[in-house]
Amino acid sequence: MGLLDGKTFLITGGSAGIGRAAAIEAARQGADVAINYVGDESLAHNCVAEIEALGRKALAVKGDVAQHETAGAFVSAAISALGRVDVFVSNAGICPFHAFLDMPVETFERTMRVNLHGAYWMTQAAANAMVAQGGGGAIVAVSSISALVGGEYQTHYTPTKAGMHSLMQSAAIALGRHGIRCNSVLPGTILTDINKDDLAGPDKRERMAARIPLGRLGQPEDLAGPIVFLASDMARYVTGAALLVDGGAFVNLQ
């Protein structure tokens, strides 16, 4: 018996990194899975193939979460293929590192549209589907430790992650009457495409790892379990919460 047996699991940014790891773990735990993606089609198809090899249904739907219409199209495609929406994970995000004083308008606005606007419209579309079908559901936002701390080259990024956490808190109140739980995970430094350039040098990776009590940087798979837990009935009385998944980095201030 898996934690997500008989459930459908939708995730944005599902072709790589944290999204891919969570999608595959959801399938291992018994869910049928729909992923949204915007980049390399081969990565998306490979993810679908891996899910299907686990005996679960899967589909990949291409679309830019920054566009409002992408949300409805993704949820509708998932319902057509899988029948319903039990779990939605808002994971798609970008972080083009840049200094504050000369931040390009286009960089700032694109980051806001993908990370925060995209999370809002996708969450709304998934929630409407859950309300219409009845039976409740679970929504998880992949926020960041950056919701709690600053970053010199992330002045456009950290507000979006704080906003995603805040969105889950407010949505938990708005949707609780429908039996829909809303929570966020706050990853620390996870080795993904979003930070591969920033962490390209071994010296910086070693410095970052040295600050973490568990002694290493995170891997995408480190987020899969916490996401599945919050999506599952084991967390049936958890809503409006935030779970740090950072190897202890946040508490290591001395």
Image (cartoon, rainbow, N blue to C red):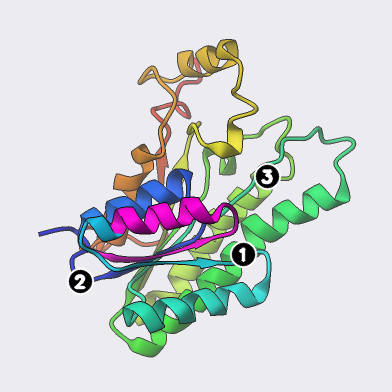
Residue where numbered disc 2 is placed = 6
Residue underneath mark 1: 65
| 6 w.r.t. 253: above or below | below
Q: Describe the element under mark 1 as helix, strand or loop.
A: loop
Q: Position of residue 90 (x, y in %)?
A: 49, 60
Q: Is residue 67 left or right of residue 220?
A: right
**What is the residue that sits farthest to the right in this orientation?**
102
Up-down relation of residue 163 to residue 125 (above or below): above
Residue 83 located left or right of residue 251: left
Specify whether residue 127 is painted magenta: no
Residue drawn at x 40%, y 27% as measured from the top left: 248
Neighbourhood count class around disc 1 (C-alpha, 10 Å): few under 14, some 14–19, many 20 upward: many
| Of callouts 2 and 1, the N-terminal one | 2
**36 or 253: nearer the eye?**
36
Taking depth in this image into account, of 161 and 96 the one nearest to the observer is 96
Mark 3 element type: loop
The answer to whether residue 130 of the structure is visible from this angle is no
Residue 224 coordinates in the image, percent (x, y)? 34, 46
Q: Amino acid at mark 3?
A: Tyr
Tell me the tag on residue 157: 3
Give the amino acid at mark 2.
Answer: Gly
Q: What residue type is disc 1 on?
A: Val
Q: Quadrant of the N terminus?
A: bottom left
Is 33 rendered above or below residue 144? Answer: below
Q: Is residue 47 magenta?
A: yes
What span is colored magenta in the figure?
31-51
- Residue toward you, 197 or 243: 197
